Image: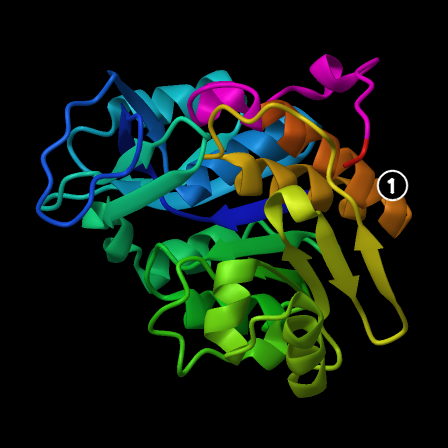
C-alpha cells in the first residue's frame, strides 16, 4: 500500500525574532536559517519517517536539485517530480517568535506548474488500496481529486492555505484534515465544535480531523465524535508540527490502527517536532518516538 503525495516543494528562509514586527517596524532577527520545506515536502518526509511507502509528485525549478536529493536520501519515490524550464523553485519566508509561533509567506514558483499528464503518469502506478494526499500549495488539485476517486483510491485533503477553493469538490474527500484557522475560514465559526459540526453537516461521508495546537484535536465521522488532548511540551518552533501530525496520523490509518492510537501517535510525533528548531530536521523518525513518555495537558 502506497501513498501518493501531490505536494509543494519549497526552499525555506527562516528568521528567528524576539517578537513579530508591527506594520512599518524594522526589526533585526536573532538568527537566520536556510532549509527546505513546503507542506508537500514536509508531509512526505513525515510519512516516510513514520514508515509509509511514499511517492511524491510535484515540480521544482532549476535550483531544486537539493530537494530531489533530500527526498531520495529518505527513500521517497521521485519518479514523477519534474523540473520547470521557466520558474524557480517555490520558497517560503518564515518568521518564528520566542514562543515558537510562526508566520509564513510563500512564493509558489514551480509548484503551480504541475501538469495533468504528469498526474496521469503517476496514477498509472497506483493500485487498489492506495492513498492520495493533496494540500493547496500546487495547481490542478481538483483534477487530482477526481482522478483519485475514479480509480477508487482514498483521498485525503489538507486545505492549506484555505484560498481559491470555491470550485473544489469537497464531497470527494475521505479524510479532511485542517487546523483551527482553516476551519474558521471554511465555516465562519470560531468554536471548534461548531466548526466540525458545520463541516460534517455539509459532507457527512467525510472523516474530519481538526487540529487545535496545544488544545489538542477533534475527530468527527458519521458515527462518532472524539476529543484528544495534546501532550505537554516546551515549544520552540511549530513550523512543521501540523505536517508531522498528518504524516503519522495517516500512516497509522493506513495500517488499520484504532482511531485513538492514530491520534496518540500523531500527537506524540507533533509534540516532539515543536521542541526542535526547523522544519524537516524537526520531524522525528518512528524509532525516535519509542520510549518517549510525555504528559497530556
**Relative horizontal placement of residue 259, taking residue 151 as reference (left or right):** right
Seen from the viewer's position, the closer of residues 274 and 42 is 274
- Residue 149 falls in image quadrant: bottom right
**Residue behind mark 1:** 261
Q: Position of residue 113 (x, y in %)?
A: 24, 55
Indicate whether 277 appears above or below 131: above
The quarter in which the N terminus is drawn is top right
- Residue 210 falls in image quadrant: bottom right
Residue found 45% across the figure and 19% down from its top: 277
Q: Residues within 10 Å of mark 1 (few under 14, many from 20)?
A: some
Seen from the viewer's position, the closer of residues 18 and 266 is 18
**Relative horizontal placement of residue 138, taking residue 128 as reference (left or right):** left
Residue found 88% across the figure and 47% down from its top: 260
Residue 158 visible within the image: no
Magenta segment boundaries in residue numbering: 274-295
Residue found 25% across the figure and 17% down from its top: 30
Residue 139 visible within the image: yes
Q: Position of residue 232 (x, y in %)?
A: 72, 29
Instruction: Kindly state the secondary structure of the residue where label 1 is placed.
Output: helix
| Residue farthest bottom in this picture | 202
Amino acid at each position: 500500500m502506497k501513498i501518493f503525495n501531490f505536494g509543494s516543494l519549497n526552499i525555506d528562509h527562516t528568521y528567528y525574532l524576539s517578537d513579530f514586527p508591527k506594520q512599518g517596524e524594522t526589526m533585526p532577527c536573532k538568527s537566520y536559517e536556510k532549509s527546505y520545506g513546503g507542506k508537500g515536502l514536509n508531509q512526505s518526509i513525515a510519512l516516510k519517517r513514520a514508515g509509509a511507502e511514499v511517492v511524491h509528485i510535484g515540480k521544482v525549478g532549476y535550483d531544486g536539485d537539493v530537494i530531489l536529493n533530500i527526498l531520495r536520501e529518505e527513500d521517497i519515490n521521485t519518479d514523477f517530480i519534474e523540473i520547470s524550464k521557466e520558474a524557480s523553485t517555490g520558497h517560503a519566508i518564515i518568521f518564528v517568535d520566542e514562543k515558537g509561533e510562526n508566520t509564513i509567506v510563500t512564493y509558489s514558483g514551480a509548484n503551480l506548474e504541475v501538469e495533468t499528464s504528469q498526474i496521469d503518469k503517476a496514477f498509472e502506478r497506483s493500485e487498489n488500496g492506495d492513498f492520495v494526499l493533496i494540500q493547496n500549495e500546487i495547481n490542478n488539485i481538483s483534477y487530482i481529486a477526481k482522478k483519485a476517486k475514479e480509480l477508487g483510491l482514498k483521498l485525503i485533503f489538507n486545505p492549506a492555505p484555505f484560498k481559491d477553493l470555491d470550485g473544489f469538490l469537497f464531497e470527494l474527500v475521505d479524510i479532511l484534515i485542517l487546523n483551527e484557522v482553516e476551519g474558521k475560514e471554511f465555516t465562519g465559526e470560531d468554536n471548534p465544535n461548531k466548526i466540525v459540526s458545520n463541516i460534517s453537516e455539509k459532507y457527512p461521508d467525510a472523516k474530519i480531523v481538526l487540529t487545535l495546537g496545544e488544545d489538542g484535536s477533534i475527530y468527527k465521522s458519521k458515527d462518532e465524535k472524539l476529543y484528544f488532548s495534546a501532550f505537554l511540551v516546551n515549544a520552540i518552533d511549530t513550523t512543521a508540527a501540523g505536517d508531522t501530525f498528518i504524516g503519522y496520523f495517516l500512516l497509522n490509518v493506513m495500517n488499520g490502527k484504532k482511531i485513538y492510537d492514530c491520534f496518540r501517535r500523531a500527537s506524540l510525533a507533533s509534540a516532539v517536532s515543536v521542541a526542535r528548531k526547523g522544519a524537516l530536521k524537526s520531524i522525528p523518525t518512528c524509532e525516535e518516538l519509542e520510549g518517549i513518555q510525555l504528559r497530556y495537558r
